[in-house]
Image: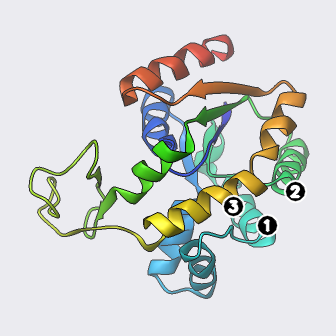
């Protein structure tokens, strides 16, 4: 299976990705994680990507497509993969379709997660990440036991620059302007299933399993 997860920042795609990887044995491909890893290593590409992410802008299509192309060619993607955060624009979606067609593969389905904007802002601006193990918490609905301290390893928690409220709102505006048209793109080709991302992670996961039943 080749599954695409779509939805605005903060909607919970990462949590559902973990469930899908565990249950279906898919390789997780997250452009956001790849960009942040490259930024931490201070590579030329990573620093360039960080400039865009820190100001709430999308990383340019040519950079993103190139990274995903190389990733899909690795052996661990042969049996199936989960694309999280890609594609984000119509040109990226068209490039992905061309790439898969060239390799005699196709998208199984696109899962689109949705939530009201104000709830998304609250989720994003309250998110904290561990500096050591990257565990994620949220001060509003999933706080650590000791404020500012990771439950898993005891290291400091922090809010990423691209999760601060002003930047979070900008990220959502950029998403709506640039990425929302993909909903129509995949609806037109009858490849999209909308998922109400409200409720607990387990409740959302149950909705996902139900939507995937037809493809298994």
Residue at image location 16% in from the left, 54% down from the top: 152
Residue at image location 68% in from the left, 16% down from the top: 215
Q: Which mark is residue 61?
A: 1
Which quadrant is the C terminus positioned in?
top right
Dot 2 falls on a residue whose secondary structure is helix
Relative horizontal placement of residue 24, taking residue 88 as reference (left or right): left
Residue 56 locus on image (x, y percent): 60, 69
The correct choice, above or below, for 159 with respect to 123 in the image is below
Q: Nearer the viewer, residue 161 or 83?
A: 161
Q: Nearer the viewer, mark 3 or mark 1?
A: 3
Dot 1 falls on a residue whose secondary structure is helix
In three-dimensional space, the C-alpha distance between marks 3 and 1, rounded to whole angstroms, equals 14 Å
In three-dimensional space, the C-alpha distance between marks 2 and 3, rounded to whole angstroms, equals 16 Å
Name which of mark 2 and mark 1 comes first in the sequence.
Answer: 1
User: Pointer 2 and pointer 1: residues touching (CB < 8 Å)?
Assistant: yes
Residue at image location 75% in from the left, 46% down from the top: 180
Looking at the rendering, which quadrant does residue 103 occupy?
top right
The correct choice, above or below, for 191 with respect to 101 in the image is above
In three-dimensional space, the C-alpha distance between marks 2 and 1, rounded to whole angstroms, equals 7 Å
């Amino acid at each position: 299976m080749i599954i695409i997860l779509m939805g605005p920042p903060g909607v919970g795609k990462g949590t559902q990705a973990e469930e899908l990887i565990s249950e279906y044995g898919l390789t997780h491909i997250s452009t956001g994680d790849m960009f942040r890893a490259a930024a931490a290593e201070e590579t030329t590409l990573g620093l360039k990507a960080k400039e865009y992410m820190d100001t709430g802008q999308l990383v340019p299509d040519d950079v993103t497509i190139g990274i995903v192309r190389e990733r899909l060619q690795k052996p661990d993607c042969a049996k199936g993969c989960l694309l999280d955060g890609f594609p984000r624009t119509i040109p990226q979606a068209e490039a992905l379709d061309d790439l898969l067609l060239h390799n005699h593969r196709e998208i199984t389905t696109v899962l689109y997660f949705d939530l009201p904007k104000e709830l998304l802002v609250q989720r994003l601006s309250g998110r904290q990440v561990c500096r050591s193990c990257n565990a994620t918490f949220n001060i509003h609905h999933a706080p650590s036991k000791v404020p500012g301290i990771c439950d898993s390893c005891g290291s400091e928690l922090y809010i990423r620059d691209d999760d601060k409220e002003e930047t979070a709102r900008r990220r959502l505006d950029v998403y709506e302007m640039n990425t929302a048209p993909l909903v129509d793109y995949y609806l037109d080709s009858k490849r999209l299933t909308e998922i109400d991302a409200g409720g607990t992670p387990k409740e959302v996961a149950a909705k996902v399993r139900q939507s995937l039943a037809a493809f298994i």
